[in-house]
Amino acid sequence: MQPPLPAPRPVPGPVEEVLHDTGWAGEARSALACAGSLLGVSLGVDACAHEPTPLGTAGWIALAAVLLVVLLPARVGVAPGLLVVQGLWLTRTVRIDRLVSVSWPQGTSRRLILRDDEGSRAEVDLRVLLANPGLWLRIETGARASRRRGTLTHGTTDLADLSLRVHAETTRRILKASGLQ
């Protein structure tokens, strides 16, 4: 008979769930596949056309790396009171329970721009929020807390418009998935 397993250690403090963009891994794989395909095709064509040179190969590798950098999406994570947007080289953290400004420009850049009372700023793509309603609900909850505190002074109209858009899109997806649309 084997001895019983030891009891798990208690975790200090409450463990809060961090929500992440569920589509990030697929988009990152697609970016890597596009860059890898460009590299493979360009090296193949270069090899068929003439003998590849080290300078030409380095150029194709650099071009594929630039394509990867352009296509790789930022990773978005939201914990209660905190938004983290991790780019390739830069990580931006915003306290969503202490927001001072929310803006949602209606132009071609479909990004939500958040600023907190510490001066931190982060941008989140609207497609991420539409694809992950849980992320939006955490951001909306933090914005409500900021409004109750009195720190959110700019962008409440943009926030309300975006809230309607996200909730309408979520409802449409639920109805479509259940076959009621």
Image (tube, rainbow, N blue to C red):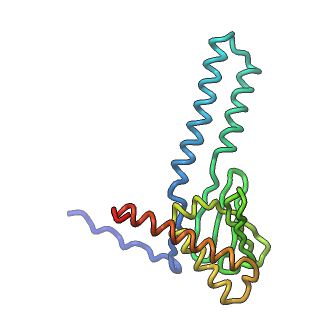
Identify the residue shown where x is 74% and y is 21%: 56
Which quadrant: the C terminus?
bottom left
User: Residue 77 at what x, y percent from top left?
Assistant: 59, 64
Please, is residue 174 above or below residue 99 in the view? above
In front: 64, or 160? Answer: 160
Q: Is residue 146 left or right of residue 18?
A: right
User: Residue 110 at what x, y percent from top left?
Assistant: 67, 60
Identify the residue shown where x is 28% and y is 69%: 4
Identify the residue shown where x is 56% and y is 70%: 136
Q: Is residue 15 left or right of residue 180?
A: right
User: Residue 153 at what x, y percent from top left?
Assistant: 75, 83
Q: What residue occupies the far top of the structure in this picture?
A: 50
User: Residue 134 at what x, y percent from top left?
Assistant: 51, 69
Please, is residue 156 above or below residue 114 in the view? below
Q: What residue occupies the far right of the structure in this picture?
A: 119
Which quadrant: the N terminus?
bottom left
Identify the residue shown where x is 39% and y is 61%: 176
